[in-house]
Amino acid sequence: MDKNLAIAQNKMNLIESIDHTNLPKHLAIIMDGNGRWAKQQGFLRAFGHENGTKSVKDIIKTSAKLGIEYLTLYAFSTENWNRPKLEVQALMKILINSLKKELVTLQENNIRLNAIGNLDKLPKTAQKELLDVMEKTKNNTRLTLTLALSYGSREELVNAVKSISDKVKNNIISIDTIDDSIINEHLYTQNLPDVDLLIRTSGEHRISNFLLWQIAYAELYFTNVLWPDFKDQDLYEAIISYQKRERRFGKTSEQIK
């Protein structure tokens, strides 16, 4: 059988195996492996990040077609600012160019862009482009795409604690009323549901300070595929794995059934 035909047939088989009534409502992805992918090709790390944007576009469109409502991508962490200056500059340039190029794709696919993190640390040009695309797509309803930029979950939680403490101090809220919902209201993700499925590429088995509160009951899926090689069939496989699991949320199997 022709190789391309075999790939297409495998993809069709995967699609047919997906239960569209049991999709993760909120999918989050740690996009890892760009640098290693570039090194394997004999190129600089920036080349890997550039090629990683192709997978980003592929996965966004595939998620929308499947009917996933929320997709959150870990694009740049607070720790990533410590990388070599040239790499950080390249990443910011890629971000700006991608936002400019993909506005049409977002509009055509009815996708709303959202962003979380310490966005004030981004270069002014990146902030302007980001806010512009967010404004132009704010009424789209098919999928909410959230980019985690200059994001760190511990920083997010610290900021939430400070904000809640200040409100208690000023008698805006009572300490006795603090519960999960109050904490959720003070997170960057206040308008997003909890994560159902978290995917990490490249063979690493870490969370890396990503959505620590929001993934409390998420299913975790790790793959050895490097991010630039992660395509729609890889996403299908992750979702099929997710659908084979029993999500009990602390209950017994008998209670769930």
Image (cartoon, rainbow, N blue to C red):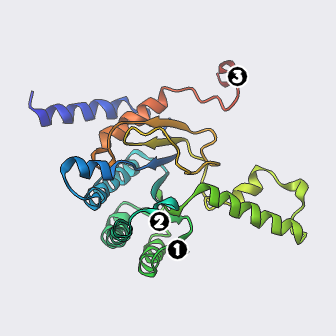
Q: Is residue 78 shown left or right of residue 6? A: right
Q: Which residue is mark 3?
A: 255
Q: Residue at x 53, y 71 (%)?
A: 119
Say what amino acid the circle numbered 2 marks: Trp
Q: Position of residue 100 (x, y in %)?
A: 33, 73
Q: CA distance from mark 1 to mark 2?
A: 9 Å
Say which amino acid is labelled 1.
Lys
First-in-chain label (1 vs 2):
2
- What's the CA distance linking mark 2 and mark 3? 46 Å
Disc 2 crowd, CA 10 A, few/some/many (<14, 14-19, 20+)? some
The percent coordinates of residue 73 (x first, y second) are 45, 54
Q: Which residue is mark 1?
A: 121
Residue 118 location (% of width, % of height): 56, 68
Q: Residues within 10 Å of mark 3 (few under 14, many from 20)?
A: few
Image depth: mark 1 or mark 3 in front: 1
Disc 1 or 3, which lies upstream in sequence?
A: 1
Label 3: state its secondary structure. helix
Q: In the rendered view of the protein, which quadrant contains the C terminus? A: top right
Viewer-nearest of discs 1 and 2: 2
Q: Is residue 114 above or below residue 130?
A: above
Of tags 2 and 3, which is closer to the observer?
A: 2
Residue at position x 39%, y 37% in the image: 203
